[in-house]
Every structure is written in structure tokens, then in C-alpha cells.
């Protein structure tokens, strides 16, 4: 199981010879993006979020719009 996870981890990331992350695949849009397009996250093994900044901002807007719609419908407006 650990070998499979390790294989998937390296398949979705590109490193330079020093071990610094250059690019990775965004889990949202499934595109290769530079590490600068991801927020830093110390909880993830490579130090960056799994979703790029664009996907996070779009997802946040959708969630906010849905919660506002639900609130309005519950109140009867």
C-alpha cells in the first residue's frame, strides 16, 4: 500500500535535482501548474495544497452562493 501511494505521489509531481517542487497536478482542474500557483500547506507532504488558487477561489464562491440560496429559501424570501 505504501508503495502504491508513493508511486501516485511522484506521478503527480515534478521535482528538480535538489528535491524542490517545480510542478504538480491540481486535483480540481487536473492541469500541470507551477508550485507558485498553490497555497502553502504544512500538513501536506510536499508543502502545498492539492488544489490551485484558482480552483479554491471558484469553489469558495460556489459554496458561498449555495449557502446564501439555502438561507433565503428557508426564510421564505
Image (cartoon, rainbow, N blue to C red):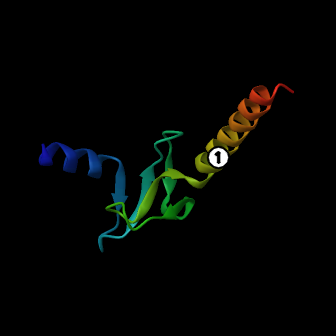
Indicate whether 64 appears above or below 22: above
Pick the residue in front: 16 or 38: 38
**Left or right position of 44 against 36:** left
The residue depicted at 30 percent of the width and 70 percent of the height is 19
Pick the residue in front: 31 or 43: 43
Farthest residue to the right: give it.
77
User: How many other residues sit within 10 Å of disc 1, few (<14), some (14-19) or many (≥20)?
Assistant: few
Question: How many numbered marks have been drawn onto this rendered protein structure?
Answer: 1
Quarter of the image with the N terminus is top left
**Left or right position of 35 against 77:** left
The residue depicted at 59 percent of the width and 55 percent of the height is 53
- Element class at badge 1: helix
Farthest residue to the bottom: give it.
18
Provide residue 26's location: percent of width, then percent of height.
48, 46
Residue position marked by numbered label 1 in the rendering: 60
Indicate whether 55 appears above or below 35: above
The residue depicted at 21 percent of the width and 46 percent of the height is 5
**Left or right position of 43 against 53:** left
Indicate whether 56 appears above or below 22: above
Quarter of the image with the C terminus is top right
Provide residue 51's location: percent of width, then percent of height.
50, 49
Provide residue 49's location: percent of width, then percent of height.
46, 57
Farthest residue to the front: give it.
75
Provide residue 45's location: percent of width, then percent of height.
31, 62
Pick the residue in front: 60 or 26: 60
**Left or right position of 34 against 17:** right
Amino acid at each position: 500500500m505504501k508503495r502504491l501511494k508513493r508511486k501516485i505521489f511522484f506521478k503527480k509531481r515534478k521535482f528538480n535535482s535538489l528535491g524542490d517542487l517545480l510542478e504538480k497536478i491540481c486535483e480540481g482542474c487536473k492541469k500541470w501548474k507551477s508550485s507558485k500557483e498553490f497555497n502553502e500547506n504544512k500538513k501536506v507532504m510536499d508543502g502545498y495544497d492539492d488544489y490551485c488558487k484558482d480552483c479554491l477561489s471558484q469553489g469558495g464562491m460556489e459554496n458561498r452562493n449555495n449557502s446564501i440560496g439555502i438561507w433565503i429559501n428557508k426564510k421564505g424570501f
